Image (cartoon, rainbow, N blue to C red):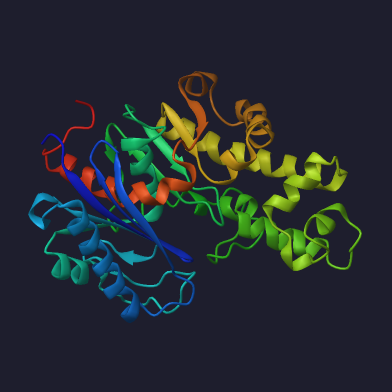
Amino acid sequence: MNEFPILGYDIGGTKIAVALMMNDGKVITSERFDNMDTDPEKMLPKLAECGLSMLKTAGISSSAVPGIGISTPSPADIPNGIITAPPNNPKWRNVEIGKFLSEKLGIETIMENDANAGMLAEWFFGAGRGCRNAIYLTMSTGIGGGIIAEGHLIEGKSFFAGEIGHMVIDREGPLCNCGLRGCYEAFCGGRAVAQRLQSELSGQPEHAIVKAAGGKVENINFVTLEKAVIAGDKYAMEIWEEIALRNAQGIGILINIFNPEKIILGTIAWAAGDIFLSPIKRYLPQFCWKETLADCEITVSALRRDIGSYAGPAIVLNHLYNEGRYNPFG
């Protein structure tokens, strides 16, 4: 296959991205929908109509599109294209989005969880291009992961592979939102960090972090912590170092297990930059061999805010690659 168009949907808790692009990453058109508290019965027809409109405006027939990629939060029934129970949108329960879009547009749909789709997006279009061994970490509200090993996405028996944020790194650690104790995400995920800070700073309106949050403890998040670190607040700097140490522990484990060429960090990492990455790199030699560390480049997402637009199309490319119909290395 040479040049061909692909259609992709990224179903997020607050936004849905729809993109029509070519397989080389050239975006033909894209659109976003607000997905806060939406009813899927009303949203699905809008998504189908958007896809049909994009194809019509671009003069592309459905038969020219080899697939529709759908990126979805976990948990989901990946093989059957069903969004089962996304944590950030309780109205989306057992939604047969794959079947619906396929019937309305007349195109095969392929689903993947959002962290794996993020890895595929970086692999085909971003910082992971050309790699045969790479790992992507979402580093946002939670910590998700996608793993490319020897040129293939690892999905696992039940399509749950890559739940990196929920490897237990300290069984005496804090309770994770998933129910386990001491998960990597419970130490370093944006939501977990915010919850910890809100608890520890309750009743301290004059603290630098609370002030950075506009004086409201409930508004404390990773960004307000970063601002306090930059301002030199001692408590904030101690928390920041602790988070860096735990990130290095989690990343170091991955480096020794998978020996990747690259580990690509999303959201928080590219938004904060060196102030986030430098201490992690300083601690990494404590958690992995110097040989595997020397093999691995720690970098940030190249797609950044646009990764959702590339996620769905990347799912299609990976499907074609697995069928031997497309070669990302050729």
Taking depth in this image into account, of 39 and 145 the one nearest to the observer is: 39
Residue 243 seen in this snapshot: yes
Report which quarter residue 226 is drawn in: top right
Vertical comparison of 211 with 314: above or below? below
284 lies left or right of 115:
right
Residue sitting at x 73%, y 43%: 240
Q: Residue furthest left?
A: 63
Q: Position of residue 264 (x, y in %)?
A: 47, 36
Q: Position of residue 197 (x, y in %)?
A: 76, 58
Is the N terminus in the top left, top right, bottom left or bottom right quadrant?
A: top left
Residue 116 seen in this snapshot: no
Q: Position of residue 63 (x, y in %)?
A: 7, 54
Taking depth in this image into account, of 181 and 35 the one nearest to the observer is: 35
Q: Position of residue 227 (x, y in %)?
A: 76, 46
10 lies left or right of 209:
left
Vertical comparison of 4 with 131: above or below? below
Report which quarter residue 99 is drawn in: bottom left
Taking depth in this image into account, of 58 and 137 the one nearest to the observer is: 58
